[in-house]
Image: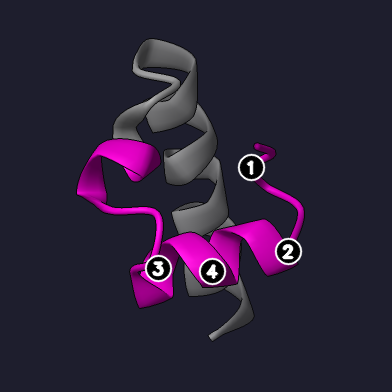
């Protein structure tokens, strides 16, 4: 499970490098957005 989580986080970092506004485009109030913000992977 840990390896899966690390891989997923790395994938998100790559996505955000390519398209920094990707998560915001999904909706700022989505569960995903809130989780990434809580983990400090995205900033407003």
Outermost residue on the top side: it is 18
Instruction: Return the disc, 2 or 3, that comes first in the chain's sequence.
Output: 3
Q: Nearer the viewer, mark 4 or mark 2?
A: 4
Distance between mark 4 and mark 3 Cα atoms: 5 Å
Query: Mark 1 — residue?
Result: 42
User: Is residue 43 rendered to the left or right of residue 9?
Assistant: right
- Mark found first going from the N terminus, 4 or 2: 4
Q: Going by the image, does 27 lie left or right of 29?
A: left
Q: Is 6 positioned to the left or the right of 26 in the image?
A: right
Badge 4: how crowded within 10 Å, few (<14), some, or many (20+)?
some
Q: Position of residue 12 (x, y in %)?
A: 45, 43
Instruction: Kindly check if marks 4 and 3 are in contact, taking CB atoms under 8 A apart as contact.
Output: yes
Circles 1, 2 touching at the beta carbon (< 8 Å): no
Nearer to the camera, 16 or 29: 29
- Residue at coordinates 37% horizontally, 13% vertically from top-left? 18
Residue drawn at 40 percent across, 68 percent down: 32
Q: Nearer the viewer, residue 4 or 18?
A: 18
Dot 4 corresponds to which residue?
Answer: 34
Against 40, residue 21 (above or below) is: above
Q: Dot 3: within a 10 Å radius of its alpha carbon, few (fewer than 14), some, or many (20 or more) residues?
A: some
* Helix, strand or loop at mark 4: helix
Measured from the top left, where is residue 27 in percent x and y?
A: 28, 53
Instruction: Tell me whether circle 2 and circle 3 mark residues in contact (CB < 8 Å).
Output: no
Which class describes the residues within 10 Å of circle 1: few (<14), some (14-19), or many (20+)?
some
Q: CA distance from mark 2 to mark 3?
A: 11 Å
Q: Along the polypeptide, which appears first: circle 1 or circle 4?
A: 4
Q: Magenta segment range?
A: 23-44
Q: Which mark is residue 39?
A: 2
Residue beneath disc 3: 32
CA–CA distance between discs 1 and 4? 9 Å
């Amino acid at each position: 499970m840990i390896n899966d989580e690390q891989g997923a986080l790395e994938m998100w970092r790559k996505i955000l490098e390519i398209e920094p506004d990707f998560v915001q485009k999904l909706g700022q109030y989505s569960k995903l957005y809130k989780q990434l913000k809580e983990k400090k992977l995205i900033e407003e």
